[in-house]
Amino acid sequence: MDSINQIITLQHIDSQLKDIAELLGDLPKKVEELKDEESALIQSVEDGKIRLKELDLELNKSEGLMKDINVKINKHKDQLFLVTSNKQYDALQLEIDHLKGELDEIETKTLENTDEKEQ
């Protein structure tokens, strides 16, 4: 008789476990998916923070370069009035044009970095 009672108790416990499993359904799977999604979002935020720091460094570097180039351009423009030959004038003008081209490239890159930073 004792074994029959144990079997009945075991059957009852087994039924309860089945009911609990049905209640859980795919909840463990959903929890795991949400944990994975959370991890991905956390990583994305960390990557974004790193990129923002990189952009700040690039923007600061670009600002310094633009100031240096503007100083050089102004220096060369002042020298234009002191030249004594057309060859010197042309060389200075060519250097000014080259510096302006560099300045345009840096300004374009700065604008792109600023846009990326704002997003």
Image (cartoon, rainbow, N blue to C red):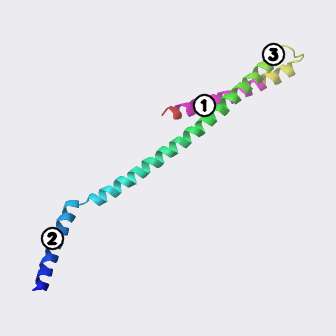
Helix, strand or loop at mark 1: helix
Q: Residue at x 61, y 33 (%)?
A: 109
User: How many C-alpha atoms fall within 10 Å of the one at disc 1: few (<14), some, or many (≥20)?
Assistant: many
Q: Give x and y (percent) for residue 20.
A: 20, 64
| Residue annotated with mark 3 | 78
- Looking at the picture, which amino acid does disc 2 mark? Ser
Q: CA distance from mark 3 to mark 1?
A: 27 Å
User: How many C-alpha atoms fall within 10 Å of the one at disc 2: few (<14), some, or many (≥20)?
Assistant: few
- Looking at the picture, which amino acid does disc 1 mark? Thr
| Residue annotated with mark 2 | 15
| CB under 8 Å between discs 3 and 2 | no
| CB under 8 Å between discs 1 and 2 | no
Q: CA distance from mark 3 to mark 2?
A: 94 Å
Q: CA distance from mark 1 to mark 2?
A: 68 Å
Q: Give x and y (percent) for residue 9.
A: 14, 76
Q: Quadrant of residue 80?
A: top right
Q: Quadrant of residue 57?
A: top right
- Towards the viewer: 110 or 47: 47
| Residue annotated with mark 1 | 110
Helix, strand or loop at mark 3: helix
Mark positioned earlier in the residue sequence (3 or 2)? 2
Q: What range is drawn magenta here?
A: 95-115
- Towards the viewer: 53 or 97: 53
Mark positioned earlier in the residue sequence (3 or 1)? 3
Q: Quadrant of residue 104?
A: top right
Q: Tell whether 30 sits left or right of 102.
A: left
Helix, strand or loop at mark 2: helix
Q: Give x and y (percent) for residue 118.
A: 50, 31
